[in-house]
Image: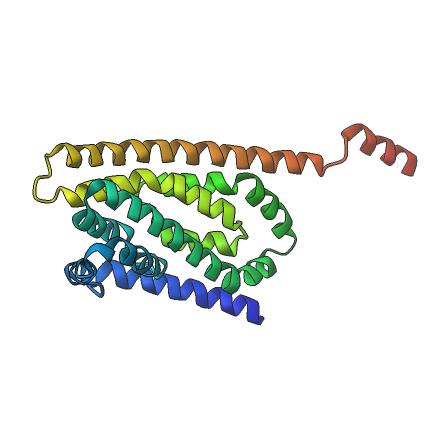
């Protein structure tokens, strides 16, 4: 196994380990983090964005970070801060994934890397958008994967900025309504979360269908026409 593949394997191992650690342990104390950011006073939103972005790229769960934003800043400012953090976090992870994983992916795929690059250019923004809206799919690991697969900065930035809005609003509104979950903000957060999940699932379904059609079309173009094949066989005989 060459160095590029080893780096790809190491990247996957680190990401899997981080997901397990942050989802099964309390390495990040939400209350402590909230208090430390809140202690910065009027600067808190500006402090929150880079801190949350780095933690998010390190695979700290996004709902936890967005909830902190909602508690500290309320549903409106919290949504803006969460989206800004999500975009910055996605770009950090995308850069890391491209540097550490892209050569290994190209080496692993070989000739299949070229068709994948075409699909990435064509559907990259939609892929990011659909993933950001999809229910139960964490953003950070996929941001690393998007970088390894060669998606551009623009695709990741636009897809995240648009796709992160519903969940950013939902988690911020729910976080701001912890004392009264049945408040209008709390209910709106839950409704938007459910609707965005449905939209994300539909986008994912359509993208899978488009990818299958693209593969079938490519396979069909790669085969010689039946008539020409028969003529060639006749001439050869």
Can you see residue 237?
no
> Which is more toward the observer, 92 or 80?
80
Furthest residue to the left?
A: 179
Q: Is residue 101 left or right of residue 142?
A: right
Furthest residue to the front?
A: 42
> Which is more toward the observer, 116 or 121?
121
Q: Is residue 186 left or right of residue 48?
A: left
The location of residue 166, given as percent across then percent down, is 31, 37
| Visual colour scheme | rainbow
In the depicted structure, whether residue 197 falls above or below residue 61: above
The location of residue 95, given as percent across then percent down, is 48, 59
Q: What is the quadrant of residue 194 in the picture?
A: top left
> Residue at position x 15%, y 60% from top?
35
> Which is more toward the observer, 54 or 43?
43
Quarter of the picture holding the C terminus: top right
> Residue at position x 16%, y 49% from top?
71
Q: Is residue 212 left or right of residue 36?
A: right
Can you see residue 85?
yes
> Residue at position x 59%, y 58% from top?
106
Furthest residue to the top?
A: 227
The location of residue 159, given as percent across then percent down, is 44, 42
Q: So how many labels did they put on this image?
A: 0
> Which is more toward the observer, 127 or 187?
187
The location of residue 177, given as percent across then percent down, is 13, 41
In the depicted structure, whether residue 32 falls above or below residue 115: below
Quarter of the picture holding the N terminus: bottom right
């Amino acid at each position: 196994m060459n160095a590029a593949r080893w780096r790809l394997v190491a990247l996957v191992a680190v990401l899997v380990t981080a997901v397990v650690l942050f989802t099964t342990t309390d390495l990040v104390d939400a209350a402590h983090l909230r208090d430390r950011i809140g202690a910065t006073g009027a600067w808190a939103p500006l402090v929150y964005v880079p801190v949350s972005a780095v933690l998010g790229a390190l695979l700290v769960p996004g709902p936890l970070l967005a909830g902190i934003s909602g508690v500290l800043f309320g549903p409106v400012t919290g949504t803006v801060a969460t989206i800004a953090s999500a975009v910055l976090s996605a770009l950090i992870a995308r850069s890391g994934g491209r540097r550490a994983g892209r050569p290994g992916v190209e080496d692993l795929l070989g000739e299949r890397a070229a068709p994948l690059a075409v699909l990435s250019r064509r559907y990259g923004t939609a892929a990011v958008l659909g993933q950001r809206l999809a229910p139960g799919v964490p953003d950070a690991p996929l941001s690393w994967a998007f970088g390894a697969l060669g998606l551009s900065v623009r695709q990741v930035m636009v897809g995240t900025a648009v796709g992160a809005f519903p969940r950013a609003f939902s988690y911020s509104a729910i976080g701001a309504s912890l004392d009264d979950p049945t408040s209008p903000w709390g209910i709106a957060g839950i409704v938007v979360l459910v609707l965005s999940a449905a939209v994300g699932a539909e986008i994912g379904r359509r993208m899978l269908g488009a990818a299958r059609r693209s593969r079938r079309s490519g396979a069909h173009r790669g085969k010689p026409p039946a008539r020409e094949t028969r003529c060639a066989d006749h001439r050869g005989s």
